[in-house]
Image: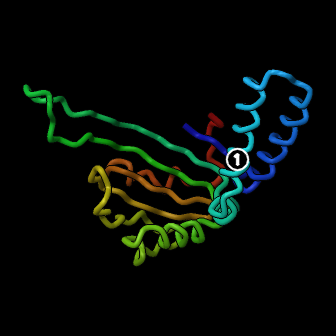
């Protein structure tokens, strides 16, 4: 799954849509329809005008999620399972400033405080996150215009290639 968008343009877009919706529904008499529409538009504008959006928006232009293997554990005879799902995949984040995006992540996730990634270097192992619901072997790499995270040793091997400039990605 991939999507590319200018996240920093979302607050302006939400505000425009909200204004357009209010104008379009101004003469409507059915409050059962206009009230939920107006409330939804107002909530979208409020959500997308969050200060975090203004902080991260300029650093986030695209997102590509690749799930290449997902195996859910089979439940035991009692219906319960103690095993964790097995997962391999990649998260590729397009950004004009991947180091800035990484710095933002460090401020929210203390375990990443010592993580340093050099542009174009080989992927390095991410530290374990004690509050993560599932324990995963994760690796990260940055390159001009992107931050990549791979889960699983097999995905680590081709993570740098996945970030190569000019690589065509689907929109959706």
Query: Closest to the observer: 49 or 129?
Result: 49
**Is residue 99 placed above or below 165 in the rendered structure?**
below
**Is residue 65 placed above or below 104 in the rendered structure?**
above
The picture quadrant where one finds residue 35 is top right
**Relative horizontal placement of residue 104, taking residue 68 as reference (left or right):** right
Query: How many residues crowd around disc 1 within 10 Å: few (fewer than 14), some, or many (20 or more)?
Result: some
Residue found at x 15% / y 36%: 81
**Relative horizontal placement of residue 84, taking residue 1 as reference (left or right):** left
Query: Whole-percent x and y of residue 19?
Result: 86, 42
Q: How many marks?
A: 1
Residue found at x 43% / y 68%: 109
Query: Closest to the observer: 131 or 152?
Result: 131
Q: Which quarter shows the N terminus?
A: top right
Task: Name the element at disc 1.
Answer: loop
* Identity of the residue furthest to the left in this view: 77
Q: How is the image coloured?
A: rainbow
Query: Whole-percent x and y of residue 115?
Result: 42, 74
Residue found at x 36% / y 64%: 126
**Relative horizontal placement of residue 136, taking residue 147 as reference (left or right):** left
Identify the residue under disc 1: 5
Query: Whole-percent x and y of residue 122?
Result: 43, 65
Residue found at x 77% / y 45%: 14
Q: Which quarter shows the C terminus?
A: top right
**Is residue 116 placed above or below 14 in the rendered structure?**
below
Query: Whole-percent x and y of residue 171?
Result: 65, 37
């Amino acid at each position: 799954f991939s999507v590319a968008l200018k996240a920093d343009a979302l607050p302006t877009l939400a505000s425009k849509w909200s204004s357009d919706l209010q104008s379009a529904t101004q003469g409507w008499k059915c409050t059962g329809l206009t009230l939920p529409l107006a409330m939804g538009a107002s909530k979208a504008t409020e959500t997308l005008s969050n200060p975090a959006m203004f902080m991260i928006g300029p650093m986030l232009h695209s997102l590509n999620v690749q799930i290449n293997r997902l195996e859910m554990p089979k439940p035991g005879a009692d219906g319960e399972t103690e095993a964790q799902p097995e997962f391999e995949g990649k998260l590729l984040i397009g950004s004009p400033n991947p180091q800035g995006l990484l710095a933002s992540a460090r401020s929210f996730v203390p375990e990443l405080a010592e993580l340093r990634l050099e542009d174009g270097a080989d992927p390095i192992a991410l530290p374990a996150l004690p509050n993560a619901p599932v324990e995963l072997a994760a690796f990260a790499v940055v390159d001009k215009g992107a931050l990549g995270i791979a889960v699983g040793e097999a995905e680590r091997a081709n993570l740098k290639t996945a970030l190569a400039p000019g690589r065509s990605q689907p929109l959706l």
